[in-house]
Image (cartoon, helix red, strand yellow):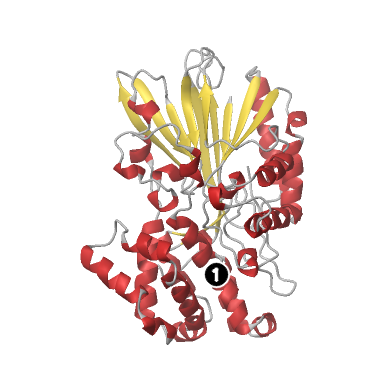
Amino acid sequence: MLVVLSDLHFSEAQSTKIGDLRFNKNLPVETYQAYFSELNQIAVSNQIPKLDLVLAGDILELSRSAFWFESGERPYQDNEAIEPGSLTEATILKIIDAITREEKVAETLALFRQIKGLFAVDVELHYILGNHDRLINATPQIRSRVRELFGLPGGDTLFDHQFLFRTGDGTAFCLVRHGHEYDPMNFSVDTHAMEVIPTEFPETVYGTASLGDITTIEFGAALPYYFIAEYGEEAIQQDPILMALYERLMGFDDVRPTTALLAYIFSTPGVKKRQTWDYMAPCFRRLTVTLAENPRFVDGITRASTLSASQRLLLRGLLNSNLLQQGVPYWMVKQLMKRVSKEIKLSSQVRWAKRDALVKDQNSGCKCVISGHTHFPEVSLMSAKKGDERYYINTGTWRNVIPATKNFKEFGRLKAMAKVIVFRPSEKSDSSPDGSSWSFHFLSGVSFGNHRHL
């Protein structure tokens, strides 16, 4: 029996707090306790001897933290360039320690460490890396620390990037990966240009920073950091408009679709658009200048697939302009945000999952590809030749989602969750009572308000 969870994004709330106000997005341990109890009942009632629980990437949020700005480092470094004992390693360890000091995370990690005692069947925990926790593989000390936190064996050995769920005869009938492999913005290789996507890539490919690493920190974490630097904590706490804008910035990374990011800021309740621009302009200027001085960002965004040749020339010219030092016009920020949000826009990945080598090989026995990354839960039929059904499943996320109306003028707040359970051909389940074929259960939903029902 296979269970997959991804995109939990355990994060620290210390570097972004204002006075005593903290923006803690972590789920309480009770959420996971309830789910594990349910899984145990399913395993026992179906007489399943072993459960494989896979954490499929983006579990620890290492990219989006203001501690990067305090150290002067950035997370968009290749793993091979990060030396043991370096300032970058120290910053990563500091962020990990800060995450684990969050009460909700500390309790959840303790739950993972004692997971074998929570089940009446054999259970094994696996952790594969995504793009937001890529840096875990950077040095032996970081790897050892994370393995210790989750109660995983292996010491300082490298973390895997995929998990193959096999049948009794060794056939890999289910491939689990994070899913950033299907997203060139967040992967160092453009798999969209490949006819066949390999099951495994070299470690250097996974360890190489991508354009998404830059946008995650510079858009997701820099704007709140610049806002505090510009106005100061005391002034923000005393001014309702400043506080409303800062709270808006703290929800930036939960907005869906990503093309609504700028509209989200400029629709802050109680704040006029002109006021928003006046307050945010200095922050956008710092952000744009920082990006313009980053060759990797300029080259990456101006080579983006969503841009025409003329748009590339215009954007490159703007990002190289000395006028940025004097001020940033609204239209330029709008265009830049539009281009970036188009590149990070995530949709169904089934068309790329179909190109996975195990799926392309009709004799491989692979029936299912499971990934996360997009935060959009999904089940799609990849093929059904001669009755051989093969599915793509996306695990979604267990965190907040800020949905937008169609015109991007109004925004809500929802809590998302998705359950993915896969049974081997030899395992009994409600959908295959005789154990004659594999099966899966997929439950996805959202909740509104403070009560989260599993």
Quadrant where the image shows the N terminus? top right
The kind of residue on which mark 1 rests is Ala
Q: In the image, 418: left or right of 291?
A: right
Residue 174: x %, y % from top left: 48, 26
Residue 261: x %, y % from top left: 44, 67
Q: Give the residue at x 51% y 66%.
A: 218
Q: How many marks?
A: 1
Q: Is residue 424 above or below residue 377?
A: above
Q: Using the rendered image of the protein, determine whether residue 243 is visible from the camera's viewpoint.
A: no
**Where, by quadrant of the figure, is residue 336 drawn?**
bottom left
Q: In the image, 5: left or right of 308?
A: right
Residue 18: x %, y % from top left: 69, 74
Give the class, few, some or many, for how many residues have Cα within 10 Å of label 1's Cα (few <14, many ≥20). many
Q: In the image, 443: left or right of 313?
A: right
Q: Is residue 304 above or below residue 166?
A: below
**Where, by quadrant of the figure, is residue 393 drawn?**
top left
Q: Helix or strand or loop: what does disc 1 sit on? A: helix
Residue 308: x %, y % from top left: 23, 62
Q: Give the residue at x 46% y 22%.
A: 173
Nearest the eye: 293 or 354? 293
Nearest the eye: 48 or 148? 148
Q: Give the residue at x 49% y 23%.
A: 439
Q: Give the residue at x 44% y 32%.
A: 369
Quadrant where the image shows the C terminus? top right
Q: Is residue 41 above or below residue 186?
A: above
Q: Using the rendered image of the protein, determine whether residue 224 is visible from the camera's viewpoint.
A: yes
Look at mark 1 in the image and give the residue it sits on: 222
